[in-house]
Amino acid sequence: MQTPNSEEPPESGGRGDEFALIERLRDRFESAGGPSIHPGDLWIGDDAAAVTLPHVGRVVLATDLVVDGVHVDAALCEPEDIGWKALMVTVSDLGAMGADVSFALLSVAAPVGFAIERLGAGVAEAAAIVGCAVVGGDLSASPVLVVSVTAVGSVPDDGHALLRRDGARAGDHLFVTGPLGGSSAGLRLLRGGDSGDSGVVQSELAAAYRRPMARMVEGSVARRAGATACIDISDGLLADLVHVAEASGVGLELEAGESVVVAGATRHEALAGGEEYELVLATPDPDGLVEAFRAAGLRPPLAIGRCTGEDGVYSLDGGPLPEGGWRHQF
Amino acid sequence: MQTPNSEEPPESGGRGDEFALIERLRDRFESAGGPSIHPGDLWIGDDAAAVTLPHVGRVVLATDLVVDGVHVDAALCEPEDIGWKALMVTVSDLGAMGADVSFALLSVAAPVGFAIERLGAGVAEAAAIVGCAVVGGDLSASPVLVVSVTAVGSVPDDGHALLRRDGARAGDHLFVTGPLGGSSAGLRLLRGGDSGDSGVVQSELAAAYRRPMARMVEGSVARRAGATACIDISDGLLADLVHVAEASGVGLELEAGESVVVAGATRHEALAGGEEYELVLATPDPDGLVEAFRAAGLRPPLAIGRCTGEDGVYSLDGGPLPEGGWRHQF
C-alpha cells in the first residue's frame, strides 16, 4: 500500500495513526497468502508494487484515489483537470520506481449530473502524454466525487533494478527533479490569496495545482544511471525525504537553496507543500546522474544535500529540521 | 470498461445513457493511443481487459467500485462483508473470462471513524479463498464509503482462449453455474420483508447478499472445456444473457425451470436480481461441459436454453421476454 495522499486521516488521530493502520493492513494481507513472492518483488510499502504474475512475469502496479474536498477542490478546477490529475498522480508512482506505464483503469463514482465525459477527456489527455492506454474501469453514482486510477506497467530487462525508497546509503547525494511549491501556491492563489505575482506566474502556479506532470522519463533515466532510491513528492519535499531516510536507515543533511523554490511560491510551500510529483533521488554518483539527465535532454536535477550514516538525524541548512513544521499543512 | 454495476445511472436518464457514456469514453480512450494492441487483446467492452504488457506478456485486468447506498447498504452488513464483496465482485470479472487472479489492489475512501481495518479483514478473507494477494492500495477520508478493487491476473498458456461475451454462436447451449435470486431475496429479508422461510433459508439468503462467491474454478474449467462465451451475473440473469446475445449477434430461446430459483427467492428475483456472480455460459458441447464440471468436483451447471440464429429475438418459456421487466429493479 502506498503512502496515502489524503490530508485528513480516515480514522481518528493524525498521520501516525494512518501509517499504523496501513502497517496492520499490510500484515493482514501478507499473512493471507497468495502467489509466491519472487526475489526482487515488492508488495505493500513503496510507491508501487512489483509482483511476479504466474505464466507472465514482473508487473508494476499502483493505485490512487482522488476525492473531491480532500485531494482536489472541484470548485477550483475543471472536470478535465481532475481527470488529468487522477491519471498523473497514479502513474507518478510507477515513475518513482523507474518503471514504464502501459495501461490504466479508471473508476469514477460521481454525483448525478457530474460531467464524467469531460473528466474522461482529461484522463485521455494525460494518458496520451505518458503513453499509456486506458483499458477498463467502472462507473457509479455517489454523493461525492471519488476517482480511482490504477496504473499497470513494467520495467525493461536492462539489468537495472527498480528504484525503491529504501535503497539510499550513507554518502549518497540527494536531488530533486525540479523546483517546488507550485501546487500549494497555485491552490493558495485559486482560493483567492493575495499575490503580487504577474499573470504569467499566476497562471503557471494554477497549472501546477491543476495539471501536475508525472516524471516518467526522469525516473527511468535515474534508474539506468544508478540512482539508489527514489520517491515522488506527494506529501511534501521534507516529509518525503524523511520517508526515504526512514526506509533506508540513513540520516539527512539537507541544503535547500532558492533554486528549489518555484517563482511565486513561498519557501514553506516549496519545502512542505504536497501534491508536487517531482521526484526525489539518491545517488552515489552525482556527476553521472546530472550527465544522464543532460544526455536525455532533461532539465538538470537540483542538488539538495546528502545522506549520512546517522540514522534518524536530520538537518536543514545547518540547523535542525523544524519539528513537525515540515508536515503538509495546506 | 466493464458493464457498471451501479443501479442508479451516474448521469441523467437510464442505463441506456450510461452505456452510451461508456461507448463515448471507450472511443476517446482508444483514440488516445498507448501500447500496441496484440491479436487476442481485449480493451474496454468485456468483463475484464486482456492486454499485452511490453517486455512481459498478457495480463488480465478488472476494476469495480462498491459505493455505500448504491452497491451495498452499510446498515445491513458488517465492514468485513463490504470488503469481502468488493474483492469478490472484482475477481469475478476475471473468473468470467476463465482467467486466474493473482493480485489485487484495494482503495478505500471512508468517513472518519469507519472501521477500515475490519473492511480489510474481509478483503483478506476473500482474497485467501480465491488465492490472490493484496499488494497495494490507497486510503482517503471521504463523506461516503467508496471501495475500489482492481484485480490482476493471467491465463495459463494451455491453448484455450479467454472467454468473451461475444463468442456465443447459434445452436450453443446456455447454462448457469448455480441457482439464482439469493442476493435479491437476502436484501429483501434484511430490509425487513416478510418471509415464511426457515431460519436456515433466511441465513443462507442473507449470506448470498453479504458474501457473494466468485466462480473462479467454474470459469477456468468452462474455458478449458470449450465454452464459447461467458459473463458473470451482475445485472441480473436475463439482462446479462441479453448482453451476451447482443455482443454475439444471436437470439435466445430460454427455459428457466424451478431449478434456477434458489430456495426462498421468488422467480422474479432469480431472473432479474443482480449482484449474483454465478456465471452464464454458452457452449456447443453441453455434455462436455457437464462432464468437465463433474470431473472437477463442481456442482453441475443448470441448462437454461439455447442460442438461435435470429439476432435480437428473445423468448422465455415459449413466450416473449417481458418488456423491460427483466431489468434489475430491486
Image (cartoon, coloured by chain):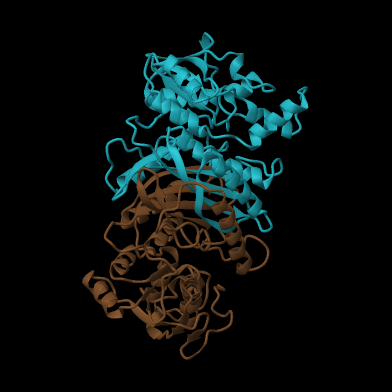
Chain colours: A cyan, B brown
Residue A256 visible from this viewpoint? yes
Q: Is residue B330 above or below residue B65?
A: below
**Given the current orientation, which residue lies at the most extreme bottom position?**
B318
Q: Is residue B189 left or right of residue B88?
A: right
Q: Camera-side residue: B68 or A249?
A: A249
Q: Camera-side residue: A287 or B242?
A: A287
Q: Is residue A317 above or below residue B117?
A: above
Give percent across and percent down for residue A207.
67, 34
Write down the quadrant of residue A165 in the picture: top left
Q: Quadrant of the C terminus of chain A?
A: top right
Give percent across and percent down for residue A18.
48, 37
Q: Camera-side residue: B283 or B38?
A: B38
Give percent across and percent down for residue B208.
41, 68
Number of residue marks: 0
Q: Is residue B55 left or right of residue B288?
A: right
Residue A68 visible from this viewpoint? no
Write down the quadrant of residue B56 in the picture: top left
Q: Residue at x 54, y 10 (%)?
A: A317
Q: Quadrant of the N terminus of chain A?
A: top left
Write down the quadrant of residue B100 in the picture: bottom left
Q: Is residue A29 left or right of residue A15?
A: left
Q: Camera-side residue: B139 or B131?
A: B131
Q: Is residue A57 left or right of residue A329?
A: left
**Given the current orientation, which residue lies at the most extreme left position?**
B295
Q: Residue at x 24, y 76 (%)?
A: B291
Give percent across and percent down for residue B115.
48, 48
